[in-house]
Amino acid sequence: MPNKILEPNTTVSTKKGTADKTSINEDEMKNSPLHKFFVSALKDIYYAENAILEALEKMQEAATSEDLKDAFEDHHLQTQKHVKRLEKVFKLIDETPEKKECKAIKGIIEEGEETIKSTEEGSATRDVGLIIAAQKVEHYEIATYGGLAQLAITMGHNKAADLLERTLQEEEDTDAELTEIAETSINFDAEQED
């Protein structure tokens, strides 16, 4: 099914191309259930990104591998940019940046904290657990940003979609970097531990 792009004051026809057409203006768009869902999801990921900032500091401190510590530091800086980018998205769609508790990210972060508590300090096993915890965060973000970018396109928020897609690409890159760190050394080091 082809994507329908709803831009303010444009006309959209159905797949069959019949005379059944709907004109969407900006006020109707802002009050639509889809727009409300989109804003709610933005608030959710805005909360998540802010929570991730705190978690990354703890993860960096708990990591043993310098490569992993560096990756967490780099991602912390990148996450600060993601927060600013989300604030721009809110502005582009005429909404106020606001956090809505994200239970999913809270749970994933709690798992990461449990990994730190249940593994030996200075061990490669802890680093393996931290990478898995961080990748769970990345996969949540990838799913969220991918969906939000597509919704932004559908609703005609093209500038917002560009910002969301840029963040999506960065999250995918971070996930790949974490995989590389695990595969090139940490997993093997953990296997050798007693």
Image: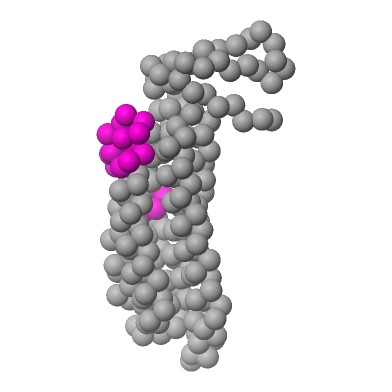
Q: Residue at 49% x, 70% y: name it.
A: 178
Residue 97 in the magenta stretch? The answer is yes
Q: Position of residue 107 (x, y in %)?
A: 39, 55
- Image-based side of 8 in relation to 15, left or right: left
Would you say residue 86 is visible in this rendering? Answer: yes
| Residue farthest top in this picture | 19
Q: Position of residue 36 (x, y in %)?
A: 40, 28
Q: Is residue 7 above or below residue 73?
A: above
Q: Position of residue 48 (x, y in %)?
A: 35, 50
Would you say residue 100 is visible in this rendering? Answer: no
Q: Nearer the viewer, residue 81 or 181?
A: 81
Q: Residue at 49% x, 90% y: name it.
A: 193
Q: Is residue 60 above or below residue 194?
A: above
User: Which range is magenta?
Assistant: 87-106
The answer to which image quadrant residue 41 occupies is: top left
Q: Nearer the viewer, residue 168 or 190?
A: 168
